[in-house]
Image (tube, rainbow, N blue to C red):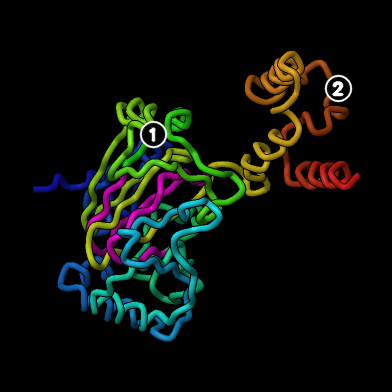
Amino acid sequence: MRAPCDFSADALPAEVLQSTRPVLLRGLVRHWPLVQAAQRADAAFCDYLRGFGANTRLSLWRGAPEIGGRFFYNDDFSGFNYRSEVQMLGALLDELLAGTPDALYLGSTEVDRAFPGLRQANDVPALAACNPLVSLWLGNRMQVATHFDLPDNLACVVAGRRRFTLFPPEQVVNLYIGPLDLTPAGQPVSLVDVTRPDLQRFPRYAQALTQAQTFELLPGDALFIPSQWWHGVESLEPISALVNFWWRQSPAFMDTPLNTLLMALLSLRDLPPAQRDAWRALFDHYIFDADGQTAAHIPPAARGVLASMTDDTARQLRSMLRNRLNR
């Protein structure tokens, strides 16, 4: 028996939505028509989803049976072991129901754009104030490499079983992250296969496993994944689907810190050690240890970008950066 969820989709407290650790929410969305259709039969689930746009053209990934459902790099890391294609939703559902040997993966597809009306009866009202981006993920048995997302994430399984393996952000040193400039979907990924980790090639991964959390979700279950927690995802059934909600706790004008990391690679990493240490002190002072006293000695009207960031200040800062980068 699964323990019932202590919360409802209409009311999720701050202790969940602002948690810095994963939170499992058993049965949170079991009332959704999408979930109830899946619990009847795969065909019922596909028929329900088909009603929101069988002729909608969608971008998906297709991998040969030989990849075993693991969407990843090719052998020499010059590209990937799958190809992208466009297919109508109805044809994709027919192929899944027929049990295709290919690995099929419809990645993050915006629900409100691609499936008008679907969200009306399959929503989490408690997140309305967060203005989340809502996406559908659909496919057969497959594996998505361990990665992190910048937004907070509420992942709701609607069909099939999914297994999530999560690692806290500080385990990055033990996850053997791949290229930053060639990634499957925009985010850097771990090179370790979570289903068959090669500890001879990746020995530090054993340390990561001591901090790992694994969750297996059934239709109707949800998992809150905090920002920047690394997570690998396995779909365990011939038809598997998930709806997720992404939102940020930071202002919309803030850029992704990944841009900062890339700029730091360009401007900081290869400095002489003493200069890197000097810049580390500056970053600690102005960024990581910044508080109300950092710029208190400067008259408020003269603090410029050291003042509290606003939409106007962010635009000014972007303009300054563009001018500097274009020199």
User: How many marks can you see?
Assistant: 2
Where is residue 240 shown, x and y percent of the image? Answer: 28, 64
Instruction: Locate residue 65: give its quadrant.
Output: bottom left
Q: Residue at x 62, y 41 (%)?
A: 258
- Give the magenta-colored segment's residue range: 136-164
Residue 26 in sight from this viewpoint: yes
Where is residue 277 shown, x and y percent of the image? Answer: 70, 15
Query: Is most of the magenta stretch helix, strand or loop?
Result: strand
- Residue 201 - label: 1
Which residue is labeled 2 in the image?
A: 299
In the picture, measured across the screen, residue 204 lies left or right of residue 250, that is left
Which quadrant of the figure contains the C terminus?
Answer: top right
> Looking at the picture, does residue 306 appear above or below residue 67?
above
Q: Nearer the viewer, residue 22 or 121?
A: 22
Q: Residue at x 27, y 40 (%)?
A: 214
Q: Amino acid at mark 1?
A: Arg
Q: Outermost residue toward the front?
A: 76
Q: Residue at x 65, y 37 (%)?
A: 261
Q: Residue at x 82, y 42 (%)?
A: 321
Q: Amino acid at mark 2?
A: Pro
Q: Outermost residue toward the top?
A: 274
Q: Nearer the viewer, residue 70 or 140?
A: 70
Q: Is residue 282 magenta?
A: no
Which structural element holds mark 1?
loop
Residue 293 in sight from this viewpoint: no
In the picture, measured across the screen, residue 205 lies left or right of residue 221, that is right
